[in-house]
Image: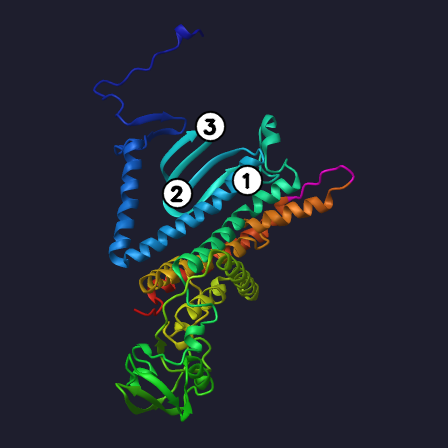
């Protein structure tokens, strides 16, 4: 039977046409899926401007509700991260590697521009920055024509220069900030000679709800004795309190030329829970400035001390507990607040998120610009040491891989490590970092640090 001879199906009289929205399937008729009308979307340019407006609005709200100095510290942290990536960018370009992207932030793109072979841009979540270097590991597929411009194809010393450039930038910034602090702004001396050795001193601050406040110590008082132990300077006071935690004692002060004897119980230091805590801060002498040469020497010396403290803190427990070793010397050195209990109560080794760091920095900046410079210097040291931790995705992981490949390469043959074997450890490490960060963030929001006002 030919196609022309096939019978034509006829529709029974009175039958309506096939209902709209139905299609013929092999198993019969099924209703067609309803089509949901698509909502009109903003043009890409308008969407980028809208996201940018939200970011600016969030920064303005931060400045209004948290304070201008907190906003300044947040901006400084963003600049620090950008300079870290800028170090990688410069050394990669210098080594002849291809850098395809340099973005500030993560998430949706707000703005970008292409210059040469690199795209520079800004993204909505200002929580970091990144550069994309071609062929950072042997798992990345690269056009053979561009293989000679990859990170993995370069000599060992070139790869090492790129891997350590971020931390090197942090260390350079730390030394520079300390140099400015010591030579331009002025400082009280790392060993606090004006506090511990000067006899003529007086109480400048009394911590609310502290033992000193309960006894009736007032700003302007000069403490001359604790439990009948003579006090000549602030160093003597710290020594007298060392073994008196939770013990009743009398505190003798000179107030308006008269000697007053106050009674009360010495508290326990929130720093270690064992040494005595009174809750007073000394009146500091005017800061002194060093000449540029000696200031640079002090900067390098103190830089070494903070590197050691940060490394020991991270090695002891890999978390932001290292901030105790990082921030402790700063607060103790600048205003002796930590030693005298003015940071408030709570766990001195608690993990601190970027929210806590911003609040600490803002509080220090309100009190003294020198404290802010020291704070940023010590943060740079901490970030530099942290990034050299020998696991991916940190820079230290790339240092370990490059060094291992160099040790395994001999006889003119280039050895390439199997990066895939390091990925499980890297995943666990990232999970730990994210978990610690989220816990710290939630605690800093729900149970913020008690800082001196």
Q: Is residue 297 left or right of residue 197?
A: right
Q: Is residue 144 left or right of residue 319?
A: right
Q: Compare marks 2 and 1 and give the one earlier in the sequence.
A: 1
**Disc 3 from disc 2: Cα separation:** 24 Å
**Disc 3 from disc 1: Cα separation:** 17 Å
Q: Which mark is residue 116?
A: 3
**Which image quadrant for residue 195?**
bottom left
Report which residue position mark 1 lands on: 91
Q: Main secondary structure of the magenta part?
A: loop
How far across and down, in percent of the image, does residue 370 sit? 38, 61
Q: What's drawn in magenta, residue-wise?
A: 411-418
Q: Secondary structure at mark 2?
A: strand
Q: Compare marks 3 and 1 and give the one earlier in the sequence.
A: 1
Residues tagged 3 and 2 counted as in contact (Cβ below 8 A)? no
How far across and down, in percent of the image, does residue 359 sit? 35, 61
Q: Judge depth for marks 2 and 1 and give the one in front.
A: 1
Q: For the C terminus, which image quadrant?
A: bottom left
363 relative to 223, above or below? above
Q: Judge depth for marks 3 and 2 and give the one in front.
A: 3
**Which image quadrant for residue 364?**
bottom left
Judging depth in this view, the residue of 120 and 300 nearest the camera is: 300
Q: Residue furthest left?
A: 14
Picture residue at 48% right of the left edge, 44% below the top: 85
Residue 273 drawn in magenta: no
447 relative to 73, above or below? below
Residue 413 drawn in magenta: yes
Q: Compare marks 3 and 2 and give the one earlier in the sequence.
A: 2
How far across and down, in percent of the image, does residue 140 sit? 57, 37
């Amino acid at each position: 039977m030919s196609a022309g001879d096939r019978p034509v199906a006829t529709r029974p009289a009175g039958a309506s046409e096939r209902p709209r929205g139905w299609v013929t399937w092999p198993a019969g008729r099924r209703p067609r899926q309803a089509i949901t009308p698509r909502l009109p979307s903003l043009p890409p340019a308008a969407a980028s401007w809208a996201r940018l407006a939200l970011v600016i609005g969030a920064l303005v709200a931060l400045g209004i509700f948290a304070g201008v100095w907190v906003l300044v510290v947040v901006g400084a942290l963003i600049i620090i991260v950008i300079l870290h990536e800028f170090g990688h960018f410069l050394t990669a370009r210098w080594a002849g590697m291809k850098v395809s992207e340099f973005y500030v932030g993560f998430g949706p793109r707000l703005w970008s521009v292409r210059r040469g072979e690199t795209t520079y841009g800004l993204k909505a979540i200002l929580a970091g920055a990144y550069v994309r270097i071609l062929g950072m590991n042997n798992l990345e597929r690269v056009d053979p024509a561009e293989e000679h411009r990859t990170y993995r194809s370069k000599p060992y010393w070139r790869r090492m220069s790129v891997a350590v450039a971020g931390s090197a930038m942090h260390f350079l910034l730390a030394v520079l900030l300390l140099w400015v602090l010591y030579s331009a702004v002025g400082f009280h001396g790392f060993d606090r000679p004006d506090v511990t050795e000067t006899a003529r001193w007086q109480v400048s601050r009394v911590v609310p709800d502290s033992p000193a406040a309960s006894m009736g110590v007032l700003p302007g008082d000069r403490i001359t004795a604790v439990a009948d132990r003579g006090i000549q300077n602030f160093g003597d006071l710290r020594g007298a309190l060392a073994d008196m935690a939770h013990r009743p004692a009398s505190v003798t002060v000179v107030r308006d030329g008269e000697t007053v004897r106050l009674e009360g119980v010495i508290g326990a230091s929130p720093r270690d829970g064992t040494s005595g805590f009174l809750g007073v801060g000394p009146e500091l002498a005017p800061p002194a400035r060093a000449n540029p040469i000696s200031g640079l020497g002090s900067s390098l010396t103190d830089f070494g001390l903070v590197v050691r403290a940060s490394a020991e803190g991270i090695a002891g427990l890999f978390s932001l507990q290292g901030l105790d070793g990082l921030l402790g010397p700063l607060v103790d050195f600048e205003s002796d607040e930590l030693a005298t209990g003015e940071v408030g109560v709570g766990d001195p080794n608690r993990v601190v998120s970027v929210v806590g760091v911003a609040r600490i920095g803002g509080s220090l900046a309100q009190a003294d610009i020198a404290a802010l410079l020291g704070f940023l210097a010590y943060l740079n040291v901490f970030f530099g040491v942290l990034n050299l931790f020998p696991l991916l995705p940190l820079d230290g992981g790339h240092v370990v891989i490059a060094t291992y490949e160099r040790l395994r390469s001999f006889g003119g043959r280039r050895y390439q490590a199997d990066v895939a074997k390091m990925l499980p450890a890297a995943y666990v490490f990232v999970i730990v970092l994210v978990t610690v960060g989220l816990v710290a963030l939630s605690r800093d929001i729900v149970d913020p640090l008690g800082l001196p006002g």
